[in-house]
Image (cartoon, grey):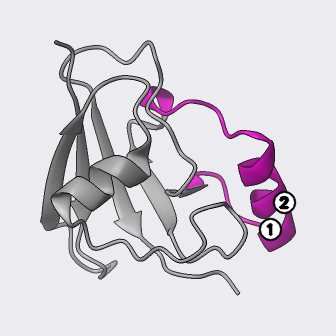
Amino acid sequence: MTKVRIEVLVDDPSRDDVDTVMECAPGSDVVDACDAACAPIDFSCRAACCSTCRIQVLAGAEWLAPPGDLEDELIAASGEAPGVRYTCVARVAENAPDGATIRVRPLGAAF
């Protein structure tokens, strides 16, 4: 079975320490992997409307599916920089190969 690795860094931009490592299948919802691993990413609405689960994708962005309409609206509303995604609605790309790694850092709510 194909597995994608998601590494969640500590919530401190001055450090590159990995806090949590998760594995999931291509096409998986990132929020489900976070829940299963008790990852240090906060969630509130789980529907791309509050920005609590905002992350910076540091590596492996190509292994996430493109943002959907809800996430695109939230990115536009918050004026996010490239590479910012919302964990509650992000999905691992269907074409992500075995062993692909996605590295993220929690950012917290934008507003």
Rendered location of residue 42, percent (x, y)? 41, 77
Which segment did they paint magenta?
Answer: 62-84
**Disc 2 crowd, CA 10 A, few/some/many (<14, 14-19, 20+):** few
Q: Identify the element where label 1 is drawn.
A: loop
Tell me the element at label 2: helix
Mark 1 nearby-residue class (10 Å; few <14, some 14–19, many ≥20): few
- Give the labeled residue for mark 2: 76
- Kindly indicate whether the residue at mark 2 contacts the one at mark 1 (C-beta within 8 angstroms): yes
State whether residue 68 is above or below residue 27: below
Quarter the C terminus occupies: bottom right
- Amino acid type shown at disc 2: Ala
Q: Nearer the viewer, residue 80 or 38?
A: 38
Q: Residue 100 or 3: which is nearer the viewer? A: 3
Q: Which mark is residue 98?
A: none
Please name the residue shown 44% across and 25% down the image: 27
Residue carrying label 1: 79
Location of residue 71 in the rendering, given as x and y in whole percent from the top left corner: 71, 52
Q: Measured along the vertical axis of the image, is residue 59 above or below residue 79? A: above
User: From the viewer's perspective, is residue 109 above or below residue 28?
Assistant: below
**Residue 71 among those drawn in magenta:** yes
The amino acid type of the residue labelled 1 equals Gly
Q: Indicate left or right for 6 with 79 as reference.
A: left
